[in-house]
């Protein structure tokens, strides 16, 4: 079997598609655009290629239809498993809600119109709760994630027009500098090794005057002692063991959460105790509109998320603002909302970049969630 056939046969979901190389894609070593190698003659579709090649000889494998710019998912393996296991749970198209759409709209400043017809970079795209909304809003999306969540994202949206996905590190993305109208990174920065470095990298992908929107856990993130203790233990285990424990705890304790929620009148104090004692993340109060089976899926997903993430940094709004200001971004808006801190700004002009030395930040932050 030829490598092209092997790659096609291994595709998990789609045997056709329209994924093409976007104009912003560049070799990280030489800064040159890529061409497709292998597969059907004359095909322009990435899933029919075995590799992407740059004119100076770099080759990037295309595995199961997705270009892989990193050799492994590294510290994000738990996320990879999580998003493949709960591939559709948080998609509005699956939940029948507007939870993801509302969050995205708020983070973009109040309207999805800002992405229509625009080149959007979605860094740390996960399974694609925001990818599908961006595409449906008329954006051309380059989605990237370090983990194998790219396979879940591709399975969800792989045949959409204007969609390209790759496995790559947000700090080293294979894209031309300052080439995107909109750079979006939600639910990600706090999970990277160095949030300030990650924000600086993101700021380098947005056009002068373009929009960058990010969020971050805040210092009041509910890292209760039970979550801290269990997470510290799970991070020492193999990931398959860790996830069994995280899911087992959720399956055991969630019925108690649900029982107290159903009888919440007069059970307020008990619920507060439970919130402090139990590591389980539940959504009975936050999203009662979710179907009962989705309330269970979201609890399994987010309890696993909060107990197995390798990095969990915390920042307050002033710290995020200082980081964005120091990068020479303009129109910086930061507020306490959503998962903690939400921020957006406009891409730095060449002049502002020069004033800031065009260099990564020298800011340091000390504390993080244990
Ligand atoms: C909590 S998930 C959020 C996913 C998606 N944005 C969402 O909100 O559903 C965090 C994601 O960031 C990704 N991630 C973490 N570090 C990354 C890095 N250095 N480069 C790219 N993606 C990264 C993880 O693999 C994971 O899919
Ligand atoms: Zn190259």
Image (cartoon, rainbow, N blue to C red):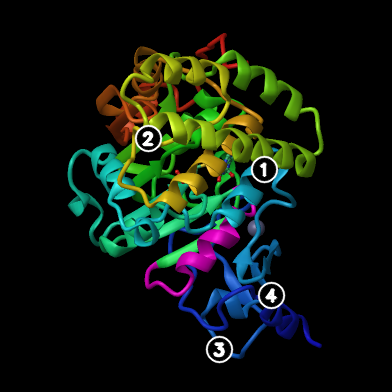
**Which residue is tagged 2?**
262
Secondary structure under tag 1 reads helix
Quick one: quadrant of the N terminus?
bottom right
User: Which label's residue is closer to the chain start, 1 or 2?
Assistant: 1
User: Which label's residue is closer to the chain start, 2 or 3?
Assistant: 3
**Which residue is tagged 1?**
78
Q: Nearer the viewer, mark 2 or mark 3?
A: 2
- Whether residue 357 is visible to the viewer of this picture, yes or no, is yes
* Crowdedness near tag 1: few (<14), some (14–19) or many (≥20) residues, C-alpha within 10 Å: many
| C-alpha distance separating marks 4 and 1 | 27 Å
User: Which label's residue is closer to the chain start, 4 or 1?
Assistant: 4
Secondary structure under tag 2 reads helix
Quadrant of the displayed image that contains ligand 1: top right
* Crowdedness near tag 2: few (<14), some (14–19) or many (≥20) residues, C-alpha within 10 Å: few
Q: Are marks 3 and 1 in contact (CB under 8 Å)?
A: no
**Which residue is tagged 3?**
42
| C-alpha distance separating marks 4 and 2 | 53 Å
Residue 341 x %, y %: 36, 24
Seen from the viewer's position, the closer of residues 184 and 10 is: 10
Q: Are marks 4 and 2 in contact (CB under 8 Å)?
A: no
């Amino acid at each position: 079997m030829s490598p092209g056939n092997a790659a096609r046969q291994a595709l998990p979901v789609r045997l056709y598609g329209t994924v093409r190389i976007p104009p912003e894609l560049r070799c990280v070593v030489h800064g040159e655009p890529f061409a497709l190698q292998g597969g059907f003659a004359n095909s322009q579709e990435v899933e029919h290629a075995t590799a992407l090649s740059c004119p100076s000889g770099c080759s990037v494998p295309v595995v199961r239809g997705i270009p892989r710019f990193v050799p492994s998912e590294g510290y994000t393996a738990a996320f990879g498993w999580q998003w493949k296991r709960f591939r559709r749970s948080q998609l509005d198209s699956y939940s029948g809600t507007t939870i993801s759409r509302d969050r995205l709209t708020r983070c973009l400043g109040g309207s999805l119109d800002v992405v229509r017809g625009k080149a959007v970079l979605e860094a740390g795209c996960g399974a694609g709760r925001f990818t599908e909304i961006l595409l449906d809003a008329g954006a051309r999306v380059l989605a990237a994630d370090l983990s194998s969540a790219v396979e879940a994202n591709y399975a969800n949206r792989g045949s959409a027009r204007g969609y390209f996905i790759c496995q790559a590190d947000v700090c080293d993305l294979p894209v031309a500098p300052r080439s995107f109208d909109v750079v979006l990174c939600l639910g990600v920065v706090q999970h990277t090794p160095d949030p300030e470095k990650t924000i600086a990298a993101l700021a380098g992908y947005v056009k002068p005057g373009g929009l960058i929107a990010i969020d971050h856990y805040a210092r009041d993130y509910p890292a209760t002692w039970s979550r801290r203790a269990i997470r510290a233990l799970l991070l020492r285990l193999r990931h398959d063991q860790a996830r069994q424990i995280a899911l087992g705890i959720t399956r055991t304790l969630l019925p108690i959460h649900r029982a107290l929620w159903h009888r919440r009148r007069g059970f307020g104090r008990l619920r507060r105790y439970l919130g402090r004692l139990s590591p389980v993340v539940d959504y009975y109060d936050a999203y009662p509109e979710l179907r009962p089976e989705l309330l269970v899926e979201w609890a399994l997903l987010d309890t696993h998320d909060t107990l197995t993430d390798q990095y969990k940094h915390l920042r307050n709004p002033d710290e995020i603002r200082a980081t964005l200001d120091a990068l020479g971004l303009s129109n910086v808006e930061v507020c306490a909302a959503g998962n903690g801190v939400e921020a957006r700004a406009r891409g730095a002009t060449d002049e502002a970049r020069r004033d800031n030395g065009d260099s990564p930040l020298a800011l340091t932050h000390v504390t993080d969630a244990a």
